[in-house]
């Protein structure tokens, strides 16, 4: 019977390569700006917006309103043409991929119009500040996943044990991730708002994973494992840089973007940005869904489906 396995195994390997190629490298290889939201203000704003092309989505506004839009992360950059000198304004609270594209495009447009350009940054971010939000989200996911998988492999834990594992993972991972923040950049804030958001994200991830592991057993790893690879490839980009297919099928729902962008705003001093509250609601929903699955009565999935061995007792 083992003689029939090589071809199916090869086909399975090819299928894995196809799936991972789409989830990871495909998203990165097809990155291109498509209506990246920016704001412009000043006497030439209307003319610039009318001939700006499809790469940018221009919003003609006033300087105060443009700054508010940037604070709320509704635009990724602001070009202020008032006062005789062009000023390009970006924000460290915006995803670095979006801020970089906006700064480059607006600087080029300003140089073509006025020559001299001044660049200002709201909420300046260090290298750690730019990296930490997505990194901590991914670490929270993989840390909780390792704990849930280990508990599943060691037996058939009941709802109480899984709930305790999810809660314990949330507490311990919050401590670990806070330690990384302090190690990477001691100037990053570690107030109760940041710690509470990290705890909510880690516990929500752990509860959702525990619920799927209860329903599917170790087979759930075939779903939960590849999701980890989505983090840097998809959630690390703003949607306007992704191919529309990736934007709709992956970015729109991936849990990492809600935790990463909410945490980015908190770390960079923009707690009133809408994505903070959006992240809180989405993560709370994930936590509630996971706990509900854990507490519902029902048959547990077989934990040892990975090797296909079922223990038989002889009496």
Image: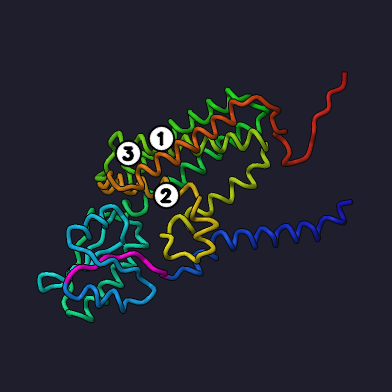
Q: Position of residue 110 (x, y in %)?
A: 22, 75
Look at 50% across and 50% down and name the residue there: 254
Local packing at callout 1 (Cα closer than 10 Å; few below 14, some 14-19, many 20+) is many
Q: Is residue 33 left or right of residue 153?
A: left
Q: Dividing the picture into quarters, in which one does residue 295 lie?
A: top right
Q: Specify the principal SS of the magenta part.
A: strand
Q: Earlier in the sequence, mark 1 or mark 2?
A: 2
Q: Which mark is residue 135?
A: 2
Stretch of the chain drawn in magenta: 33-42
Q: Earlier in the sequence, mark 3 or mark 1?
A: 3
Secondary element at tag 3: helix
Residue on which disc 1 sits: 199
Q: Position of residue 55 (x, y in %)?
A: 38, 72
Secondary element at tag 1: helix
Q: Is residue 41 magenta?
A: yes
Nearer to the camera, 315 or 254: 254
Q: Which mark is residue 240?
A: none
Q: Dividing the picture into quarters, in which one does residue 90 lie?
A: bottom left
Q: Is residue 123 magenta?
A: no
In the picture as drawn, the residue positioned furthest to the left comes out as 83
Q: Is residue 196 left or right of residue 81?
A: right
Residue on which disc 3 sits: 194
- Discs 1/2, front: 1
């Amino acid at each position: 019977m083992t003689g029939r396995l090589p071809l199916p195994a090869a086909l399975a390997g090819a299928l894995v390569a196809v799936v991972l190629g789409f989830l990871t490298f495909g998203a990165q290889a097809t990155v291109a700006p498509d209506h990246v939201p920016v704001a412009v203000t000043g006497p030439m704003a209307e003319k610039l917006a009318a001939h700006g092309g499809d790469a940018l989505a221009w919003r003609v506004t006033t300087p105060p309103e443009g700054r508010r839009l940037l604070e709320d992360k509704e635009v990724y950059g602001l070009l202020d043409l008032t006062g005789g000198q062009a000023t390009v304004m970006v924000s460290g609270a915006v995803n670095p991929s979006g801020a970089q594209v906006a700064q480059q495009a607006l600087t080029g447009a300003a140089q073509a119009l006025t020559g001299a350009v001044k660049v200002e940054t709201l909420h300046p971010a260090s290298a750690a500040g730019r990296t930490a939000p997505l990194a901590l989200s991914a670490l929270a996911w993989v840390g909780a996943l390792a704990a849930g998988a280990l508990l599943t492999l060691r037996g058939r834990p009941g709802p109480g044990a899984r709930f305790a594992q999810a809660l314990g993972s949330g507490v311990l991972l919050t401590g670990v991730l806070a330690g990384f923040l302090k190690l990477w950049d001691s100037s990053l804030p570690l107030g109760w708002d940041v710690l509470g958001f990290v705890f909510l994200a880690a516990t929500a991830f752990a509860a959702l994973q525990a619920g799927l592991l209860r329903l599917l057993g170790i087979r759930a790893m075939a779903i939960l494992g590849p999701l980890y690879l989505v983090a840097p490839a998809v959630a690390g980009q703003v949607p306007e840089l992704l191919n529309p297919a990736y934007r709709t099928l992956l970015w729109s729902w991936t849990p990492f973007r809600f935790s990463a962008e909410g945490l980015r705003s908190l770390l960079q001093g923009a707690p009133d940005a809408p994505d903070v509250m959006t992240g809180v609601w989405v993560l709370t929903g994930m936590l509630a869904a996971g706990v509900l699955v854990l507490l519902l009565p029902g048959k547990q999935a077989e934990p040892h489906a990975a090797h296909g061995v079922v223990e038989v007792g002889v009496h």
